[in-house]
Image (cartoon, rainbow, N blue to C red):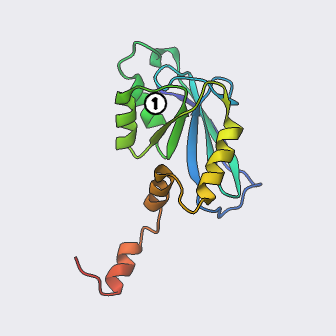
């Protein structure tokens, strides 16, 4: 069984061409606070975060079949987070951290009950810092112009 998703298709209050964004997921049962373990959590809430603001993207809920004791629970959660740059959780195992990292998703721990709004504000400050944390720098490096190699070739660069 797949995860159930509730997403905003278009948010007219957010610019069509936003600043660089990070897509961040939060393990949350109440959609307000980070309060769940990665592997046994029932849902994630995802936001697009830029230095100029944040917007709700979607809620991902997992059915009971994808809870503790299910061998496929990690794979289902990791697949559900495709497109996210990071996931904030109360706790996470080393195996899940490694599998997330292999997909380019950075696992971040937050104290139980940390408000999502507080984490988003901290991320925005870090994004605007002269030297952002490595995971943010890495996320932005991966989202640079996909045509950069074409431009380098036009300039005469060679392998």
State the image coordinates of residue 94 (x, y, percent, origin top left).
36, 29
Which residue of the protein is positioned furthest toward the top in this rendering? 69
Image quadrant containing the N terminus: top left
* Residue name at image x 70 percent, y 30 percent: 32
Image quadrant containing the C terminus: bottom left
| Residue 115 sits above or below residue 17 on the image | above
State the image coordinates of residue 11 (x, y, percent, origin top left).
72, 51
Mark 1 Cα within 10 Å, few/some/many (few <14, many 20+)? many
Regarding residue 125, the answer to whether it shows in the image is yes
* Residue name at image x 40 percent, y 46 percent: 104
SS at mark 1 in the image: helix
Which residue of the protein is positioned furthest toward the right in this rendering? 13
Question: Hey, which quadrant is residue 42 in on the image?
Answer: top right
State the image coordinates of residue 61 (x, y, percent, origin top left).
57, 26
Question: Hey, which quadrant is residue 20 in on the image?
Answer: bottom right
So how many labels did they put on this image?
Answer: 1
**Side (left or right) of 116 relative to 85:** right
Q: Nearer the viewer, residue 117 or 47?
A: 117
| Residue 25 sits above or below residue 141 on the image | above
State the image coordinates of residue 19 (x, y, percent, origin top left).
63, 62
Q: Nearer the viewer, residue 130 or 54?
A: 130
What residue would you read off at disc 1? 77
Regarding residue 49, the answer to whether it shows in the image is no
């Amino acid at each position: 069984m797949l995860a159930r998703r509730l997403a905003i298709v278009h948010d007219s209050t957010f610019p069509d061409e936003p600043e660089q964004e990070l897509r961040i997921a939060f393990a949350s049962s109440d959609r307000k606070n980070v309060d769940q373990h990665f592997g046994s959590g029932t849902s994630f809430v995802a936001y697009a975060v830029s230095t100029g603001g944040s917007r709700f993207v979607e809620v991902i809920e997992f059915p009971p079949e994808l809870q503790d004791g299910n061998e496929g629970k990690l794979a289902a959660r990791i697949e559900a987070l495709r497109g996210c740059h990071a996931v904030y959780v109360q706790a996470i195992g080393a195996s899940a951290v490694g599998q997330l990292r292999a997909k380019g998703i950075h696992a971040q721990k937050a104290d139980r009950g940390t408000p999502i709004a507080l984490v988003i504000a901290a991320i925005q400050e870090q994004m605007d810092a002269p030297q952002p944390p490595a995971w943010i720098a890495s996320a932005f490096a991966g989202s640079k112009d996909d045509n950069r190699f074409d431009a380098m070739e036009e300039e005469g660069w060679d392998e």
